[in-house]
């Protein structure tokens, strides 16, 4: 009895200590990773900091400054009178900044002030090119921010208000620097997020610890290599958050309810709410930066607009930027062609027709009508895509394809005042009808797609080839329903007939494209433009995104052509061809959205799980960033 009692007591003790042991195993890797990362960061910031910033370098983080200009031996940029120059993550402490400043050439001296969040210096009259030295403290986030305020002048025929001429800038630490506490806190938070994302992996805790140590080492080394040149705090937090979201998304695969139609709808709603939060955060941050820039307060306080106003804007008017404004004009007043600088006859009619219908029936504004059409079309597209893939590939592929579709960096256009969601719905619906041999329905949907976007007419050859494949390429089996291939061109013909009647030419939409500088070009033109843009200081990030999309989408479309049924592969390939044969690169990341078969390729089982995790973790931060830029009026695609 005593022996039995002793064994029972020992067993209970082990059971009590086991959770504590597991807690130690769970805590040790994150503590080691934090320690390694912190040591690397502290060592890198203890090194003397001295860096000469060319104009190309400091322009990347400047606000209120025009593009780079140069003479034979001098590079410079003009301010617009109120400029904010940021040197990111230089560390805490004081720094000596040496700036080359002058007034615009051929003008009189201008009064100027220079300052930070802690002090401002009156430079009096600035005229000849001189180097000004200032002793400046870094902000609590570890950035060195420098505000330049001056009078403005105009030099004919240049219409811009010109403030100061700014050349190269040298920055060096005045004393031993340390990383700002905010930098260390964000690093530790990012590593915690990565560890949380690693916990569900089916691997030993030691392998997870090694991976986390590698992440911590990479995090610490990245600060050492980019000090003063790149702001990494938000990027690491964004990547860590994306890793956690990715983990949650893939864990949901094991829950059958979340991979059903209801689950997909729930994810779609959560995605839309996330976009609204991204938009709200983008507007709030931009107004806070505006206050810092204009008022030299540098305090991260509430923005000038009240929260209610920002909330309303984040859900409505900010989604009608750029092309959305032209669709509004068409829905409200009709098409324009001659006598205007930007003739909107270049835009196809189905989307504004639906907007006008909603405006008349629901008595809402054109912006609200546009957003209602876009949201309704997206919901139908998501449900149709799930049903299509469920029938052909199964529940998991249907779930994953929708996830990749919504995570694509430009997917926010699905809920903006653009045709992307309507075009996606009609494309998916056409393939859905083809897979069920409903040829006339496919033709009608193709005709509607051709009235939405010009690539829609390319559904006709897809329909013809799929029909012939279904008839096993036997000409004697052809029936009257083959004539359905004429319906997509008929949709384009109806739009051309309208133009002929109203504007006197059926080619008005093509003529209008000349005003928009749009046209066809050989397929090597866009890659050439991207490579040329990569070397420029202000456009290299957008060019890098475009290059990744150009290469990735083309590879996936070719893979879809090889591995998926003909209706999928040919649709995905043909619908991206106009974007690849365009003469401008700007809209490529948006125009490829309707090629949904590329997401099917990513969702299939032959793709390694870790690759899908990594890809999704990279796509989500890009989606958040591009959404925040778009709602602030930046041209994205």
Image (spheres, grey):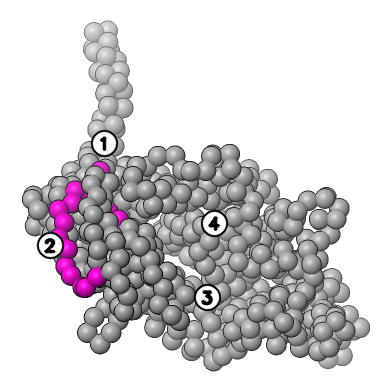
Q: Give how far apart the Cα atoms at labels 4 and 1 are.
A: 40 Å
* Residue beneath the point at 79% across and 81% down: 492
In percent of width and height, residue 290 lies at 42, 52
Query: Disc 3 designates what residue?
Result: 586
Q: Callout 2 environment at 10 Å: few (<14), some (14 to 19), or many (20+)?
A: some
**Which percent across, then down, holds residue 235?**
35, 54
* Residue pointed to by mark 2: 50
Q: Nearer the viewer, residue 589 or 615?
A: 589
Tell me the CA gap for discs 4 and 2: 37 Å
In this view, 67 is above or below 506: above
SS state under label 3: loop
Going from the N terminus, do you reach mark 2 or mark 1 first?
Answer: 1
Q: Is residue 498 left or right of residue 465?
A: right
Magenta residue check for 143: yes
Verify CB contact (< 8 Å) between mark 1 and mark 3. Answer: no
The Cα atoms of the two marked residues, 3 and 2, are separated by 37 Å
* Residue hosting label 1: 27
Q: Position of residue 263 (x, y in %)?
A: 63, 46
Query: Is disc 2 placed on a helix, strand or loop?
Result: strand
Q: Earlier in the sequence, mark 1 or mark 3?
A: 1
């Amino acid at each position: 009895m005593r022996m039995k009692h002793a064994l029972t007591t020992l067993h209970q003790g082990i059971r009590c200590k086991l959770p504590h042991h597991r807690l130690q195993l769970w805590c040790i890797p994150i503590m080691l990773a934090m320690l390694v990362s912190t040591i690397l960061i502290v060592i890198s910031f203890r090194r003397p900091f001295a860096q000469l910033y060319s104009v190309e370098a400091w322009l990347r983080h400047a606000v209120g400054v025009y593009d780079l200009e140069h003479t034979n031996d001098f590079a410079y940029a003009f301010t617009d009178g109120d400029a904010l120059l940021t040197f990111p993550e230089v560390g805490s402490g004081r720094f000596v900044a040496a700036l080359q400043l002058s007034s615009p050439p051929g003008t009189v001296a201008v009064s100027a002030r220079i300052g930070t969040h802690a002090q401002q210096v009156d430079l009096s009259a600035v005229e000849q090119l001189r180097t000004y030295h200032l002793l400046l403290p870094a902000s609590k986030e570890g950035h060195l921010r420098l505000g330049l305020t001056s009078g403005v002048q105009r030099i004919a025929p240049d219409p811009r208000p010109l403030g100061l001429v700014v050349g190269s800038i040298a920055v060096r630490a005045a004393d031993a620097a340390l990383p700002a506490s905010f930098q260390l806190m964000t690093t530790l938070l990012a590593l915690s997020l990565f560890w949380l994302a690693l916990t569900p992996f089916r691997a030993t805790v030691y392998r997870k610890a090694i991976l986390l140590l590698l992440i911590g080492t990479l995090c610490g080394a990245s600060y050492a290599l980019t000090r003063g040149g790149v702001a990494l705090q938000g990027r690491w937090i964004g990547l860590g958050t994306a890793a956690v979201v990715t983990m949650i998304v893939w864990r949901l695969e094991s829950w059958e309810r979340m991979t059903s139609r209801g689950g997909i709808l729930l994810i779609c709603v959560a995605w839309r709410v996330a976009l609204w939060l991204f938009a709200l955060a983008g507007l709030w941050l931009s107004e806070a930066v505006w206050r810092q820039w204009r008022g030299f307060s540098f305090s991260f306080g509430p923005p000038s607009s009240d929260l209610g106003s920002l909330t309303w804007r984040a859900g409505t008017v900010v989604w009608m930027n750029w092309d959305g404004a032209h669709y509004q004009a068409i829905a409200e007043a009709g098409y324009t062609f001659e006598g205007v600088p930007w003739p909107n006859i270049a835009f196809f009619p189905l989307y504004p027709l639906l907007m006008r219908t909603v405006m008349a029936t629901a008595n809402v504004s054109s912006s609200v009508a546009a957003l209602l059409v876009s949201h309704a079309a997206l919901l139908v597209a998501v449900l149709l895509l799930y049903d299509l893939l469920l029938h052909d590939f199964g529940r998991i592929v249907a779930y994953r394809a929708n996830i990749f579709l919504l995570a694509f960096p430009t997917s926010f256009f699905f809920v903006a005042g653009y045709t992307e969601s309507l075009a996606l719905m009609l494309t998916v619906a056409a393939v859905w009808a083809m897979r069920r041999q409903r040829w006339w329905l496919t033709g009608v949907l193709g005709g509607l797609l051709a009235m939405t976007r010009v690539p829609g007419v390319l559904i006709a050859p897809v329909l013809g080839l799929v029909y012939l494949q279904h008839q096993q390429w036997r000409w004697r089996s052809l029936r009257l329903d083959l004539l359905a291939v004429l319906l997509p061109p008929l949709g384009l013909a109806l739009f051309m007939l309208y133009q002929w009647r109203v504007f006197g030419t059926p080619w008005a939409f093509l003529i209008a494209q000349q005003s928009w500088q749009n046209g066809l070009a050989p397929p090597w033109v866009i890659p050439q433009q991207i490579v040329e843009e990569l070397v420029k200081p202000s456009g290299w990030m957008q060019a890098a995104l475009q290059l990744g999309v150009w290469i990735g989408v083309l590879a996936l479309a070719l893979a879809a052509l090889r591995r998926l049924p003909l209706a999928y592969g040919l649709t995905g390939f043909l619908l991206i061809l106009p974007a690849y044969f365009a003469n401008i690169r700007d809209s490529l990341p948006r125009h490829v959205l309707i090629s949904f078969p590329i997401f099917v390729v990513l969702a299939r089982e032959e793709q390694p799980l870790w690759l899908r995790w990594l890809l999704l973790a990279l796509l989500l931060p890009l989606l958040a960033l591009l959404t925040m830029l778009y709602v602030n009026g930046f041209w994205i695609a």
